[in-house]
Amino acid sequence: MPERSEGDSRKLLRRLRDVLATPAKGQVRLDRITHLIADSMRTEVCSIYLFRDAETLELCATEGLKKAAVHKTRMKLGEGLVGRVAKAGLPVNTADAPSEKGFRYMPETGEELYSSFLGVPIQRVGEKLGVLVVQSKSARRYSEDEIEALDVVAMVLAEMTELGAFGGDGLGALHKQPVLFRGTTGQEGAAEGRVWLHEPRVVVTNPVADDPLTEIDRIRAAVGVLRVSVDDLLEAESLDKDQKAVLEAYRMFAHSRGWLRRMEEDIQRGLSAEAAVEKEQSAARNRLEQVPDAYLRDRLHDLDDLSNRLLRILTGQGKDTGATMPENPVLVARNIGPAELLDYGRKLKGVVLEEGSVGSHAAIVARALAIPLVIHAERITTEALNGDAILVDGDQGVVHLRPEETVARSFRDKIAMQAAAQTRYASLRDLPATTRDGVTVALHMNAGLMADLPSLVGSGAEGVGLFRTELQFLIRNQMPRRDELAQLYSRVMDAAQGRPVAFRTLDIGSDKVLPYMKPQDEPNPAMGWRAIRVGLDKPGVLRMQLQALIRAAKGRPLTVMFPFITEFSEFIEARSATLRELHREKSLGHAVPERLEIGAMLETPSLAYAPQAFFDMTDFISIGGNDLKQFFFAADRENERVRKRYDTLNLSFLSFLEQIVSRCAASNTRLSFCGEDAGRPVEALAFAAMGLRVLSMRPASIGPVKALLRRVDLGQARAVIEEARAAGDSSVRARLMEWLAAQPAS
Ligand code: PEP
Ligand code: MG
């Protein structure tokens, strides 16, 4: 067989483009393509196998195999040589296919006649579409050049698929079929809407190019721009050591000669600059996806990111591709920060992320905005297109993309049932959360945005048990001014109409990084320089915030609490700072609050063992269960793998809460619980059974928690917990659920 040249390859791509440019049905085009490839590669067989569904490949067109097998021959992912190519996303090249591991004999195709086999994946940036195969009778391995040439052809097929060149047949089903994603619940609730991609995919409309020299000039120029922009990133003054190291690796990729050379070779074979970038992106993804090492996987993201940047430079398609946000948008992204999510705000109906974690602040923002959130929906950014129909089931952590009508209908029933439940909860709004045996639990709400405040009246909350002030700092590009903050806090108090609002002073650090503050180089930021530790070490911001709060009160009662107090001395210092500001404001002639309550958040186990004087000095204590739980179980709240191992209803944790209750009772100190668990009805019941009488939660949880508390006898619930304790159970969940199932419905 004669050597293939780059010129041959270009010729083939041009002929391919002509086929695709001629109006014809999808099947006709596929048939012409297999004929063309077999002819150009001088092989007896060329076949195209495409995915029917995520697990099944189907022979969709062939030159050389029996035509009767088309749309009949199917194989599972990983089955036979074709299935192997699809599964690994890598070529298989053999001179003796029948004796190759995994070979599957398919009599209907007549393929036993063919000895040599070369299969390459048809894929587009990590999205597997099918397999392109050539076979010949003579026993020979295909050359590197031939593999490359076939790879380039497969790339063009993948691009044309994306553009819908194969209509309703075969490949046309791509991005049209329903797909189900099983992720993890980030925030409960159900939403129906249309996909809005946070970072839309770049559309390549010209996979084949006639003039390699022009394309090479284009790619070199684009890579030049990319390199300068990455160098600029590294120049930024605010970078710490870790960020620099990561960006150095990023720069290394951007400056990699091998990367540019491979793309130039692809262009010589007839691809456009854009298609060459995507081809290398796909190949790199496949290589690196096999790597279990977390560092290398991060580099995979880097390379992806660089390829996307390069594509944007080449196509001029910025982040804003000109698409308009659909009605009822559901945000789909790989990940998103709290500030970016806040930017979208309440216009979103739901959020679906490929990464993320339940304890992250993006999740907390989603909760604050009461938007259903599903995290860990793997590969959804590859599948979803802007405007696709999407159903988000936050309760089950499931997402239906382009759902069948039957699924959509039953989903709507579910939404309607939830709406009915909300109506039922609304009827409880003005009733107390009093149990059958007469114990009343005060239910407050958590907030962080002005926009949360209307829920105060609607939800029936008795007050705001936690106002997270850092959200105001996170959504800005610079430190907010005192006057701005005072105005905002004042409006919050106005909206609360005399109900108490516990303003938590700035809780930054850990995953809450202010864009305008120098990030810290800390190995364990959750246990690092955060919250009150920053407030005490850099008292300027704390002072400014305290002044803003005092001024905002305009003589009304004021409640302030400090996050992450770990030992008594920190509380003394923070409290003294508050009193100092109070005196200063007074001496300046400003009105001071008629009553000032100063509390501490108990978020580390050590504080539960603080001296009695601490409990005597605090006006109230609020348990920050999210942090307390992560330190109690030594399980990172951001790490899904370990977070899920430990049940809040674990008796050790409940016993610990009970101790805190009794310490507060001894000094008559008001105690509340404001972590996310307070909003889960069964957890809330267990907390009440352990003696907690104030719970603060997101507004949407108040109805369900109240409904449950009102239908149970707390003494009996306590007895169930005691039974579990006596039996040596780890968690009380099983017994409590069983007991609850036997309770009257209302
Ligand atoms: C907590 O830790 O439980 C808490 C309420 O604070 P945050 O979630 O903001 O850290
Ligand atoms: Mg906390």
Image (spheres, helix red, strand yellow):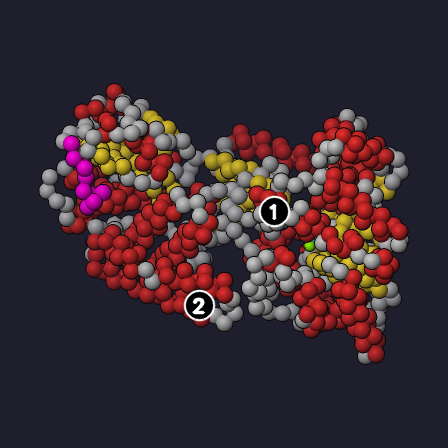
- Residue at numbered disc 2: 234
Q: Quadrant of the C terminus?
A: top right
Residue type at mark 2?
Answer: Leu
Residue at 63% of width from left, 33% of height from top?
Answer: 414
Marks 2/1: CA–CA distance: 31 Å
Residue farthest to the left, as pictured? 2
In this orientation, does residue 47 appear? yes
Q: Residue 310 location, x and y as percent?
A: 36, 58
Q: Which residues are magenta?
A: 139-147
- Residue at numbered disc 1: 358
Task: Indicate yes or no whether the magenta region holds residue 739.
Answer: no
Is residue 647 positioned above or below 632 on the image?
Answer: above
Q: Residue 444 location, x and y as percent?
A: 78, 50
Secondary structure at numbered mark 1: loop
Is residue 283 positioned above or below 520 on the image?
Answer: above
Q: Residues within 10 Å of mark 1 (few under 14, many from 20)?
A: many
Residue at 53% of width from left, 37% of height from top?
Answer: 182
Residue at 19% of width from left, 29% of height from top?
Answer: 115
